Image: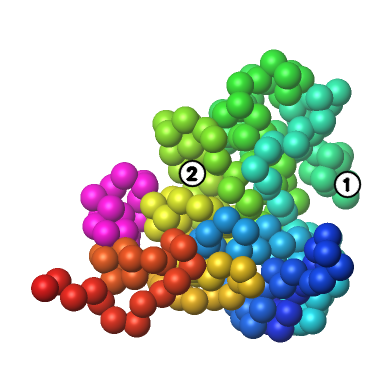
Amino acid sequence: MLEIDIARKTYPDRGGRSHVALQGLRLAAWPGEFLCLVGPSGCGKSTLLNLIIGLDRDMDGRVTLDGRVPDKGIGVMFQEPRLMPWLTVLDNVLLVADDPQQARPRAIELLRAMELGDVLHTYPGRLSGGMQRRVALARAFVIEPPLLLMDEPFVSLDAPTADRLRSMLVDLWQRRRSTIVFVTHDLREALALADRVCFLSAAPGRVVLEMPVELPRPRAPNDVAVLELQARLLAQHPDLLAGLVTTEPPNDA
């Protein structure tokens, strides 16, 4: 179980004062849960991921995975694929494995599941943007992580490609059952993917609303049920995506 309790996370600003990025943020993710984080720009979502990964440990608080400070075994997928141009597709996937030889069959299996079996020995520069994201997705899963962090991994892709990658992600997740923490600005994407959506306030970021998503799978962002749920949610909380939550539904009069 991932448990996060951050009393305060600050950065020094140019004036020598402190910028408070996160404050009073408490969050948990259950084993095998698909959790989406939604919040306005600058609310601290990427800061939070860095704290979970351990790239930054300077905080007043704690992050634990199964009762311990996470130190390895976390899969990560960023906004950009971050592939090494001098390595082949297969070698890029194996780059994160502790034992590349042992992980090789699993890497090939994942790449074939990503429909990349014909480009195992191709260099990333010869791939489309969507194919590069698929390689990054295979790399994130190859270590079979108990926890996978995803920072807007499908942003800037055209809608059909993004939909295809979401479908592949959900298929891999349902077979591997990693816990996923997925950051997005897109509410429809969150409602299509998540078991639960947590909404963050504007900086300093904290959780202002948690909502389970009980729609049956499979789902897509443009499904009628997803669009209806989005409409109901924003009718009740019209400033939700700005990081604000109203306590009562709006007056229709």
> Residues under labels 1 and 2: Cα distance?
28 Å
Q: Is residue 189 above or below residue 109?
A: below
- Residue 225 in view: yes
Q: Mark 1 or mark 2: which comes first in sequence? A: 1
Extreme residue toward the front, this view:
15
Kind of residue indicated by mark 2 = Arg
Relative to 210, 28 lies left or right: right
Residue 158 lies, in percent from the top left, at: 47, 30
Q: Nearer the viewer, residue 24 or 32?
A: 24
Furthest residue to the left? 253
Q: For the residue labelled by badge 2, is the local secondary structure a helix, a strand or a loop?
A: helix
Q: Which residue is mark 2?
A: 166
Residue at the image point whose x is 86% and y is 68% from the top: 16
Q: How is the image coloured?
A: rainbow
Q: Which residue is mark 1?
A: 99
Considering the image in quadrants, where does the N terminus appear? bottom right
Q: Quadrant of residue 214?
A: bottom left
> Helix, strand or loop at disc 1?
loop
What residue is at 72 percent from the left and 54 percent from the top? Answer: 75
